[in-house]
Amino acid sequence: MDQFIELERLSKSYRMAGEELQILHQISLSVPSGQYLSVIGPSGSGKSTLMHILGCLDVPSQGRYVLDGRDLTGLSEAALSQVRRQSIGFIFQSFNLLPSLNAVENVSLPLMYQGIPVTQQKERAEAALERVGLRERRHHRPHQLSGGQQQRVAIARALVADAPLILADEPTGNLDSHSGEEILDLFAELNAEGRTFLVITHDPAVASRSQRIVAIHDGTVVEDRKVTA
């Protein structure tokens, strides 16, 4: 199976108050194309920093990051931004929807940044909303939607550009248990279509819905195991 993500001895540190703060330590990890992986760990373990690097929102201090055969190490911010637009969809705990835009307009945003014609933006956004079961709510603004519906809009936004990698940061953290289960069911369906999913969570129940769990503690991988049914 092809390795979609390859991390080699990845480290990340920050300079704070004149001292070097080490966040990630020599992480090596391979993720096959189409895998559904959860990264689990307590607050401060480094899992969000890892997601930022995987999402090309930050860069490692040391080591290599290869995505779909392309070495991203040392790329400029403009080049990393292009990778984000073309290859990565993001789903956040806080949904990150713009309150002044309706569902179609929120979902269309990645296509707007890619310069897709407006008519195609609308068609593709409505198709993505239909895929997550929200086409009838396409003209609703975020405040008119439940938390679970807002997260579905955010998922549609992550899907609309056909990104092969979906990164989800605590995607059920602001949802009730029923809505959270519905979102995880949807993740499983989308993963079955061939997308690579990487979920950051502190919740073992959320992680148990994936195919593989990587546990991080103090910036180091302490466990890497497959999930058994």
Image (cartoon, rainbow, N blue to C red):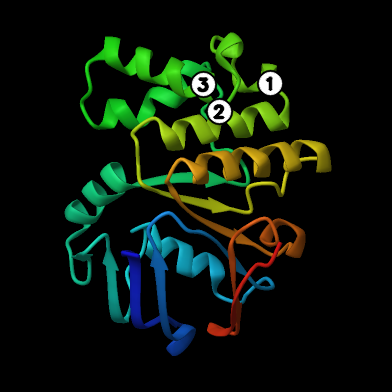
Residue behind mark 1: 145
Q: CA distance from mark 1 to mark 2?
A: 9 Å
Mark toward the start of the polypeptide (1 vs 2): 1
Work out whether residue 119 can be spotted: yes
Identify the element where label 1 is drawn: loop
- Name the image quarter holding residue 11: bottom left
Q: Amino acid at mark 1?
A: Leu
Q: Report the disc number at residue 153.
A: 2
Q: Nearer the viewer, residue 140 or 40?
A: 40
- Residues tagged 1 and 2 counted as in contact (Cβ below 8 A): yes
Residue 103 relative to residue 217: left or right: left
Q: CA distance from mark 2 to mark 3?
A: 7 Å
Compared to 57, does 218 lie above or below?
A: below
Q: Position of residue 150 (x, y in %)?
A: 63, 29
Residue behind mark 3: 129
Q: CA distance from mark 3 to mark 1?
A: 13 Å
The N terminus, quarter of image:
bottom left
Q: Position of residue 98 (x, y in %)?
A: 51, 28
- Counting labels gives 3
Compared to 126, does 57 lie above or below?
A: below
Please rate how many residues cluster around mark 1, counting C-alpha atoms within 10 Å: few if below 14, some from 14 to 19, many from 20.
some
Please rate how many residues cluster around mark 2, counting C-alpha atoms within 10 Å: few if below 14, some from 14 to 19, many from 20.
many
Which residue is at a point 68% across and 55% down the rendered structure image? Answer: 209
Which residue is at a point 59% across and 45% down the rendered structure image? Answer: 188
